[in-house]
Image (spheres, grey):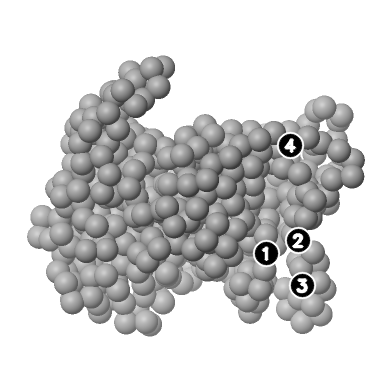
Amino acid sequence: MNLQSQKSPSGKFNGLTLFDKIWDAHVVSSIENGPTILYIDRHFCHEVTSPQAFDGLRVRGLKVLRPEKTTMTADHNTPTIDQDKPVTDPISRNQLDTFSKNAAEFNMPLFYPLGHPNNGVVHIIGPENGFTQPGTTIVCGDSHTSTHGAFGAIAFGIGTSEVEMVLATQTVLQTRPKTMRITFNGNLNSSVTAKDLALYMISKLTTGGATGYFVEYAGEAIRNMSMEERMTVCNLSIEMGARGGMIAPDETTFAYVQGREFAPKGKDLERKLSYWKTLQSDENAVFDKEYSFDAADIQPMITYGTNPGMGMGINDYIPEIEKIDEAGRISFLKSLEYMGFKPGEQLLNKQVDYVFLGSCTNGRIEDFRLFANYVKGKKKAEHVVAWLVPGSWKVENQIREEGLLEILTDAGFKLRQPGCSACLAMNDDKVPAGKYAVSTSNRNFEGRQGPGARTILAGPLVAAAAAVAGCIFDPRG
């Protein structure tokens, strides 16, 4: 690993970063040394953070200014079985009913309730339907909106009061963040995924290492990634404190976007492509901070604690207490106590109870391809409960069309219906107290997947290996 950090000097002759170019093009007005009113191109909306925002409009007698700029989908509080039946949980049912009523009252044309072909996890349906495009500003009342930055967009999460502002004005008030570039030199090794790269990065920079920054990812390892892999990396930017993450668009990006339902077409596409091709950081652009890593240093990763920064290679050992900064030792030990682990312990062969494949981090078709390819010809461990949750109905259809469902079924797995599922336990998919779950989601906080649940974050290959072996197992064999 080559880890370097430096504060770059500013100067008026410096070039512009990708972030600068997009931000500056969307400024409505700004106050010197103060906040900016930023125009928003695309707003995503789900059932959990929107009710109060619509109530605010109702109280003020306001309409949604540009309803066609907001995409609404039910995902957080949704069941992942029997979606064609009435929702039994009263809290979930109330949220979903309120969501539908708000969409109807405010004449929202892009509303995707349960069962709609375009329904699914908000950060998955955006790209797959062509709503997510390079050079745009994108917001949602959800922290993992950073996912959309993979397309060369400025995408970030906002609070409920800001959701109301976007609905009413198509703008949001923001303080301009600093810029950071993280470069991954060389190529990833076999069986190392984008999720492993992200967990490695967070383990090195910590969960606060990018606080106050918007991160641009660069380097050979990033350029060689598919769009789905890039989305995984940008999704996890928030887990090291970043305001968002982004990757310069290229031919891989353009090929992914073209042909999707809401993507530009014809002359409009030609015009936008000419603009999208300018969205690169200038060679002489100066970032406020830079880091670089060697991709070859990364191996399959797992977490051992209660935040995404407590990660290690799958064959490594939990750090000894002496290697932890004195200021962090109490929280370190508290985290291990919650997880039932000890300093210096290796987690290889540690029995697990649950495996979760899904979420806005790893619920795309490529994640299911990786998982299915590993379990093909094998059998799920009998004691493991596996939740395989596609991120959208489009992903679910691809799983069936590509023959992946047959492979998964033969191996003893069942496919659930789209939703956020066990990522945050706001629905019925909760890991019981004290049980260990290998999860492809984004957070392993105490109680994140259910009260007392113990979460080990990993990529889809490590999750597949754990589901078959019934324990933490190196997918490389």
Q: Amino acid at mark 4?
A: Ser
Q: Secondary structure at mark 1?
A: loop
Quote the CA–CA distance across marks 2 and 1. Answer: 7 Å
Counting residues from the N terminus, which is met first, the one under dot 1 or under dot 3? 1
**Along the line of sight, the residue nearer the viewer: 368 or 247:** 247
| Disc 1: CA contacts within 10 A as few (<14), some (14-19) or many (>=20) | many
The reply to whether residue 439 is visible in this rendering is: yes
Q: Which residue is mark 1?
A: 249
**Along the line of sight, the residue nearer the viewer: 300 or 129:** 300
Q: In the drawing, does residue 271 fall left or right of residue 427?
A: right
Counting residues from the N terminus, which is met first, the one under dot 3 or under dot 4? 4
Image spot of residue 96 (x, y percent) = 45, 50
Q: Which residue is mark 4?
A: 8
Query: Closer to the camera: disc 3 or disc 4?
Result: 4
Q: Which residue is mark 3?
A: 273
**Along the line of sight, the residue nearer the viewer: 180 or 431:** 180
The reply to whether residue 178 is visible in this rendering is: no
Discs 3, 4 touching: Cβ within 8 Å? no
Query: Closer to the camera: disc 4 or disc 1?
Result: 4
| Disc 4: CA contacts within 10 A as few (<14), some (14-19) or many (>=20) | few
Q: Amino acid at mark 1?
A: Pro
Q: Which residue is mark 2?
A: 279
Residue at 64% in and 50% down: 216
| Disc 3: CA contacts within 10 A as few (<14), some (14-19) or many (>=20) | some
Q: In the drawing, does residue 190 fall left or right of residue 344?
A: right
Q: Amino acid at mark 2?
A: Leu
Counting residues from the N terminus, which is met first, the one under dot 2 or under dot 4? 4
